[in-house]
Image (cartoon, rainbow, N blue to C red):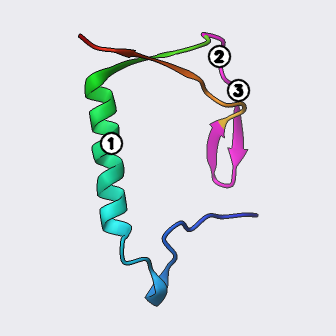
Amino acid sequence: MFQIAPFGGGIRRCIGEALALFEMKLVLATMISRYQMTLASQTPEIPQRRGVTLAPGTSVKLVLKGKR
């Protein structure tokens, strides 16, 4: 099984982890407040197991429309 640890772990954990996670939240909050997001296709997604979680079977495409 393949697992991703983008910031490492233990004593070698990335020093920029907290800043990167904060920036990610800030970017997502900005996108949600400035754009309206809708699904490009209304067909139901069939989830696939990825380790212990579920993920979409194919890529999920969004259409971004600027709010006025």
Location of the C terminus by quadrant is: top left
Query: In this figure, which residue is indicated by the disc labeled 1?
Result: 27
Which picture quadrant has residue 14?
bottom left
Residue that mark 2 sits on = 44
Could you say whether the residue bearing mark 1 is in a helix, strand or loop?
helix
Whether residue 52 sits left or right of residue 22 in the image: it is: right
Looking at the picture, which amino acid does disc 3 mark? Answer: Ile
Q: Is residue 11 magenta?
A: no
How far from the left and from the top, in percent, is residue 55?
Answer: 63, 39
Q: Which residue is mark 3?
A: 46
Residue type marked 2: Pro
Dot 1, how many residues are within 10 Å of its Cα: few (below 14), some (14-19), or many (20+)? Answer: few
- Front residue of 9/30: it is 30
Point out residue 62 in the picture as x, y percentages from the top left corner.
53, 21
Is residue 24 placed above or below 17 in the rendered structure? Answer: above
- Asked if the stretch drawn in magenta spans residue 43, the answer is yes
- Identify whether 54 is placed above or below 4: above
Callout 2: helix, strand or loop?
loop
The answer to whether the residue labelled 3 contacts the one labelled 2, judged by CB atoms less than 8 Å apart, is yes
How far, Cα to Cα, is label 3 from label 1?
A: 28 Å
Span highlighted in magenta in the image = 42-55
Q: Position of residue 64 (x, y in %)?
A: 44, 19
Residue 38: give x, y in percent of width and height: 46, 15
Amino acid on which disc 1 is placed: Val
Residue 26 in which image quadrant: top left
**In which quadrant of the rendered view does residue 57 lie?**
top right
- Seen from this angle, which residue lies furthest bottom? 11
Determine whether the residue tagged by mark 3 lies in a helix, strand or loop: loop
